[in-house]
Image: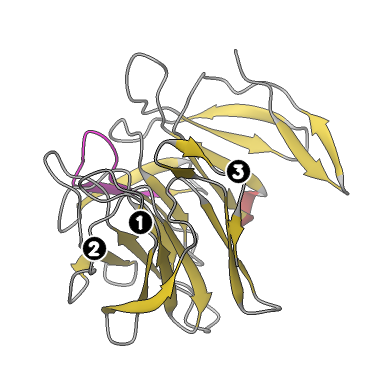
């Protein structure tokens, strides 16, 4: 394998074993029930992958799991509080999502989103309750265009529903960050002309609406990261690209 993986423990880095499969553009989620990290799909230089594996912290090793129902890259993976893992979209702009059961180790349900999307972002909606049962999917690409739409999956109903309005700008390779009280902050990305965006929008789960914000990133960026810091109620944006040039700057 061409990858050597490392984990952070008590402020130091430790080498672990290799993954069972070479992969890029994969997604992962921490599974509390099994104290492991689920790794899903990706690309192996030839094709999209349906393979999955998990990393076990107990012996710092990777174990191959059952395949997903469809191969995926540029997809999203989100774990809800009821242990449901939502694996959604991906290239080539799949309209399907599947529900993974970490206790059984299988994807056992295939459902449709309201639209195909890949290179989108997602966020588990934190409404302040003890359970999180909804995940928001935002933007991305379909086979011909960049998307302005959003989908919300509710695991209590088992279906996707469209956000009631569109974002003010189409975007992909952006970020979507849950900031509590049912809000998700959507930032940056690229539009249909591959221009890096500086715009911000807020998703309000109580109204199921996107709300444009007057604040702006400086500069615009795509492929960046966004991390919510609860102690100061702020989101830290780091790195990414501006006009194909890597950034070392941040926004707060």
Mark 2 residue crowding within 10 angstroms, few (<14) / some (14–19) / many (20+): many
Q: CA distance from mark 2 to mark 1?
A: 9 Å
State the residue in front, 67 or 141.
Answer: 141
Q: Quadrant of the C terminus?
A: bottom right
Mark 3 or mark 2: whose residue is earlier in sequence: 3
State which quadrant residue 9 falls in: top right
State the residue in front, 2 or 59.
Answer: 2
Whether label 3 touches label 1, CB < 8 Å: no
**Disc nearest the viewer among 3 and 1:** 1
Label 1 sits on residue = 197
SS class, disc 2 = loop
What residue is rendered at 51% in x and 18% in y? 22
Q: CA distance from mark 3 to mark 2?
A: 34 Å
SS class, disc 3 = strand
Q: Quadrant of the N terminus?
A: top right
Let me know if residue 93 is in the magenta part.
yes
Q: Is residue 246 left or right of residue 107?
A: right
Label 2 sits on residue = 169
What residue is rendered at 49% in x and 84% in y? 181
In the rendering, at what x and y percent does residue 31 appear?
Answer: 58, 51
- Depicted 171 relative to depicted 184: above or below: above
In the rendering, at what x and y percent does residue 240 appear?
Answer: 51, 45
Mark 2 or mark 1: whose residue is earlier in sequence: 2
In the rendering, at what x and y percent does residue 70 appear?
Answer: 28, 33
Label 3 sits on residue = 37
- Depicted 174 relative to depicted 193: above or below: below
What range of the chain is rendered magenta?
Answer: 88-100
């Amino acid at each position: 394998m061409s990858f050597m993986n490392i984990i952070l423990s008590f402020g130091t880095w430790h080498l672990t074993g290799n993954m069972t499969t070479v992969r890029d553009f994969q997604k992962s989620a921490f599974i509390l029930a099994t104290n492991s990290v689920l790794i899903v799909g990706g690309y192996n230089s030839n094709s999209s992958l349906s393979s999955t594996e998990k990393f076990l912290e107990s012996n710092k090793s990777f174990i191959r799991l059952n395949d997903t129902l469809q191969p995926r890259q540029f997809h999203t993976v989100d774990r809800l509080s009821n242990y449901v893992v939502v694996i959604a979209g991906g290239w080539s702009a799949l309209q399907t999502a599947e529900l993974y059961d970490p206790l059984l180790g299988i994807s056992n349900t295939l459902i449709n989103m309201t639209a195909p999307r890949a290179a989108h972002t997602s966020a588990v909606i934190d409404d302040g309750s003890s359970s999180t049962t909804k995940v928001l999917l935002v933007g991305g690409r379909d086979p011909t265009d960049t998307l302005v739409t959003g989908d919300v999956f509710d695991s209590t109903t088992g279906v996707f529903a469209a956000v009631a309005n569109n974002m003010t700008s189409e975007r992909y390779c952006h970020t979507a960050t849950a900031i509590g009280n049912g809000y998700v902050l959507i930032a940056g990305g690229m539009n249909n002309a591959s221009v890096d965006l500086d715009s911000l929008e807020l998703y309000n789960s109580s109204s199921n609406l996107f709300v444009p914000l007057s604040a702006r990133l400086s500069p615009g960026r795509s492929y960046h990261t966004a991390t919510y810091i609860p102690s100061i109620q702020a989101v830290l944006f780091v790195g990414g690209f501006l006009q194909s040039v890597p950034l070392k700057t941040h926004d707060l």
